[in-house]
Amino acid sequence: MTQTPMLPGWASKAMIVMVVAMLIGGVLVVKRFLEVRPREVPSVVNQPVEDAKATLKAAGFGDSKINQRPDDVVPANNVIDQLPKAGDFLGGRQSVSLVVSTGPSNIKVPSVVGKSSADAIDVLKKLKLNPVVDDTKALPNDAPKGQILSQDPAENEQVPPNTTIHLVPSAGPQGVSVPDFTGKTEDAARDLANSKNLIIVPIRQKDPNGKKNATKPGAAWKQSPAPGTDAKPNAQITVTFEPDAPAGTTTSSAPPAAGN
């Protein structure tokens, strides 16, 4: 009877190692195949970017490639688009590219200085900005009441939608308290009127009570409106002067009394 020759001990061990290695290698090959085999890409559009990355990772894909761009609809940090698209197949461990919103595009602020409050509000609201007219900060100005004098943020600044734009309007021309011109010469009255941004309209007429009032020649003895009256800038103030004013003035007589 022929006996099967026995392998040396080292050969048996080597054979066992080879078999184990082959088994391990086969397992690794299968695992690798399973990892890289094509799989369906899930939809992550509109998801927060961190949730989208976690979803793709759990589905066996590699780290996502992120690109960013503004979007007026999708909130900031949410996914606008993906590539490959949902339903496409992609090998495992490969990356899905994501386009992530940075929020709405910034808006270039226009100038509304010089516009009425209503027009300024209309312009800014059409651009999706939030105009606020600060009436408590209105400034006296020669501009009509309500006309915009300044704005913050300023013209050409880039701001997100719904940014508040503070507008300071004109309070209109500031009223002037009419000073007392009586007793003054025309030159002195004009100087005082100019300092108050008022206009003198002189009349030459004798004061019927001149002796009693001790009215001096050339001096003002009557005015309209009266002292202390509120007047607008450049308002005309009629001032009546006693005749015999200093040289260089124009004298006009009072109208004759009725019946003379």
Image: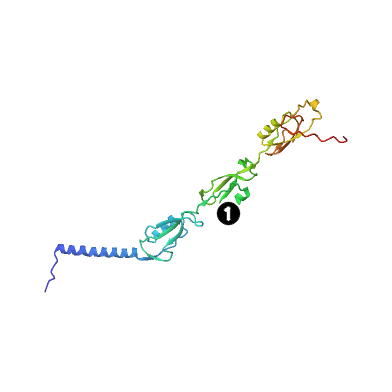
Residue farthest toward the right in the current orientation of the protein: 259
Q: Which sits in the foreground, 141 or 81?
A: 141
Residue farthest toward the bottom in the current orientation of the protein: 1
The residue that mark 1 highlights is 126
**Vertical arrangement, residue 191 with respect to residue 14, above or below:** above
Q: How is the image coloured?
A: rainbow
Instruction: Identify the residue shown where x is 42% and y is 59%.
Output: 98
Which quadrant is home to the N terminus? Answer: bottom left
Residue farthest toward the left in the current orientation of the protein: 1
Q: Which sits in the foreground, 105 or 113?
A: 113
Give how far across and how far down residue 200 sits, in percent.
Answer: 71, 36
* Kind of element beneath mark 1: helix
Q: Residues within 10 Å of mark 1 (few under 14, many from 20)?
A: few
Give how far across and how far down residue 23 sits, in percent.
Answer: 25, 65
Instruction: Identify the residue shown where x is 60% and y is 50%.
Output: 121
Residue type highlighted by circle 1 = Lys
Residue 148 in view of the camera:
yes
Residue 180 in view of the camera:
no
Which quadrant of the figure has residue 15? bottom left
